[in-house]
Image (cartoon, grey):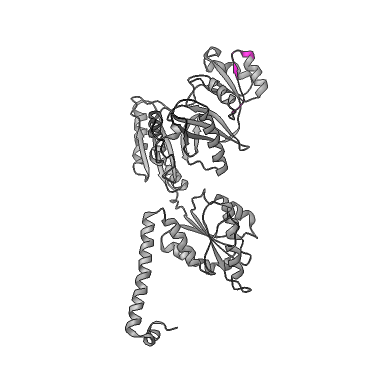
């Protein structure tokens, strides 16, 4: 695989990439340094992977030593303009024999010493950035010939561009999570593509996944012992799957296997990764809030407590706080934008009067928002109700009756139960208990008659 030729091909097809130029003499690389500035990325055309074949020259004086470290100009070198980036991304793209393509969800690859250590799926970036990265990746693969799975590695730059870094024409480290996390693994997809079979569904069947590379920490037996200790810890972690490559020799930084952890949110899988790597083991165990109960003022608490009580009844971890749309707009903005990343799955927002809180929060997050109109002295809560329920198209807020925070809590529970079998069973039990209680009252009313029922069962 000649990465310089690859760059030339993608440049010809208008794929966004960093500026690059071939270098074959000291003067040519010095000219490149003057043209692109420093630091300067120097790369081998071939046999460059896992940090090998790449080197950085921070100034003109380092050029000679950098060239020597890569085997000299006769080895085939080129340089790239340095790309400041916010994140490294990857998109696995499958191309069929007739040229059709499907793309897996964008992932973030986290590197240390130029080697991929962690893959987070899906990438925790704005949706428009995911679409941009997917578009660049798909356009790149459509420009090629052949069939199979391709890994498209990209930079998400500080100014929100997606620049193609390189393409690996094979199943890739950044796609290992697809074995457990997606409906069709990259390996099955590769076989489907080259055999002319229909391409499979690349969507994730788990809400979140992390792939952790098992890298050699030492040489020889000591390295194997350390790796096996890591594997043993992984076997005690919910949602973790171990893949050991059975390589006969272990070296420092050599990929010996990988561990994939799947879970209901990125918060959960990151917490499991911390446990795997024995981070913060002495601190208190984190419990991720799944729901939030927020209100514009503490005067709303006597009503909003009913939502909290329902969440507690169903053993759902939640957070409860004050977020005012008018008095603390910056806090509201930051709270809503970070809600999904922090692992929240639903937000219950109570507001009275102008009641802008539920709608403003809904405009800032893709999480479902349930609005609770708070009773007011002036219009008995009808102002709150009309404000919350009349959201513009595209900004939905599920709205309950005035002051009915209990129903807001129950609706949040049902939303969470739609993808939680255990919770769904508890909701069914709750519904059955409601029915049973009504039937008991009906039988008692029929037995006692209305007058005695009122006297015995409905005393003030």
Q: Nearer the viewer, residue 301 or 94?
A: 94
Tell me if residue 203 can be seen: yes
Of 265 and 415, nearer the camera is: 415
Residue 18 is a magenta residue: yes
- Name which quarter of the figure residue 185 lies in: top left
The reply to whether residue 280 is visible in this rendering is no
In the displayed structure, would residue 46 be above or below residue 358? above
In percent of the image, x 51 and y 68: which residue is there?
A: 404
State whether residue 251 is above or below residue 242.
above
Specify the segment rendered in magenta.
17-27
Instruction: Inspect the magenta stretch and tell me whether residue 392 lies in it.
Output: no
Q: Please state the horizontal and vertical placement of residue 202, each as a whole percent of the image.
A: 43, 39
The number of numbered discs placed on residues in the rendered structure image is 0
Relative placement, left or right, of 391 versus 122 is right
Quarter placement of the C terminus: bottom left
**Residue lying furthest right:** 34
Measuring from the top left, give residue 389's x and y in whole percent: 57, 63
Question: Which residue is at the far front?
Answer: 98
**Residue 235, position as x, y percentages in the image:** 34, 41
Q: What residue is rendered at 45% in x and 30% in y?
A: 98
Residues 301 and 385: in front is: 385
Give residue 324's position: percent from left, percent from top: 61, 60
Say which quarter of the image contains residue 208.
top left
């Amino acid at each position: 695989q000649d990465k310089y030729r690859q760059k030339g091909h993608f440049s010809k097809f208008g794929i966004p990439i960093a500026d690059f130029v071939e270098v074959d003499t000291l003067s040519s690389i010095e000219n490149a340094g003057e043209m692109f500035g420093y630091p300067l990325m120097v790369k081998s055309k071939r046999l460059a992977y896992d940090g090998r074949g790449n080197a950085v020259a921070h100034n003109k004086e380092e050029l000679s030593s950098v060239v020597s470290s890569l085997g000299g100009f006769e080895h085939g070198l080129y340089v790239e303009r340095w790309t400041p980036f916010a994140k490294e991304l990857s998109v696995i793209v499958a191309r069929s024999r007739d040229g059709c393509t499907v793309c897996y969800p964008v992932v973030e690859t986290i590197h240390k010493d130029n080697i991929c250590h962690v893959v987070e799926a899906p990438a925790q970036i704005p949706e428009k950035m995911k679409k941009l990265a997917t578009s660049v990746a798909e356009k790149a693969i459509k420009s090629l010939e052949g069939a199979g799975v391709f890994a498209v590695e990209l930079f998400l730059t500080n100014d929100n561009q997606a620049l193609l870094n390189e393409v690996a024409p094979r199943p890739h480290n950044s796609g290992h999570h697809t074995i457990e996390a997606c409906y069709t693994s990259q390996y099955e997809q590769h076989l489907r593509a080259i055999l002319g079979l229909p391409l499979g569904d690349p969507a994730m069947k788990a809400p979140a996944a992390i792939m952790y590379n098992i890298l050699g920490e030492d040489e020889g037996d000591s390295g194997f012992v350390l790796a096996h200790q890591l594997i043993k810890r992984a076997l005690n972690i919910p949602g973790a799957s171990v893949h050991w490559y059975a390589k006969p020799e272990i070296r420092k930084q050599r990929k010996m296997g990988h561990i994939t952890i799947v879970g209901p949110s990125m918060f959960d899988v990151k917490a499991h990764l911390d446990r795997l790597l024995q981070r913060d083991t002495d601190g208190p165990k984190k419990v991720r809030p799944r729901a939030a109960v927020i209100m514009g003022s503490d005067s709303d608490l006597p009503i909003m407590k009913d939502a909290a009580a329902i969440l507690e009844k169903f053993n759902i971890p939640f957070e409860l706080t004050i977020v005012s749309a008018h008095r603390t707009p910056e806090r509201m903005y930051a709270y809503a934008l970070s809600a999904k990343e922090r692992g929240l799955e639903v937000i219950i927002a109570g507001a009275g009067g102008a009641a802008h809180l539920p709608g403003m929060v809904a405009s800032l997050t893709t999480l479902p928002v349930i609005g609770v109109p708070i009773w007011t002295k002036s219009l008995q809560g009808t102002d709150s109700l009309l404000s919350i329920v009349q959201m513009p198209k595209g900004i939905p807020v599920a709205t309950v009756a005035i002051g009915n925070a209990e129903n807001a809590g129950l609706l949040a529970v049902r939303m969470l139960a739609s993808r939680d079998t255990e919770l769904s069973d508890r909701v069914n039990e709750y519904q059955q208990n409601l029915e049973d209680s009504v039937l008991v009252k009906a039988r008692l009313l029929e037995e006692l008659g209305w007058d005695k029922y009122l006297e015995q069962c409905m005393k003030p």
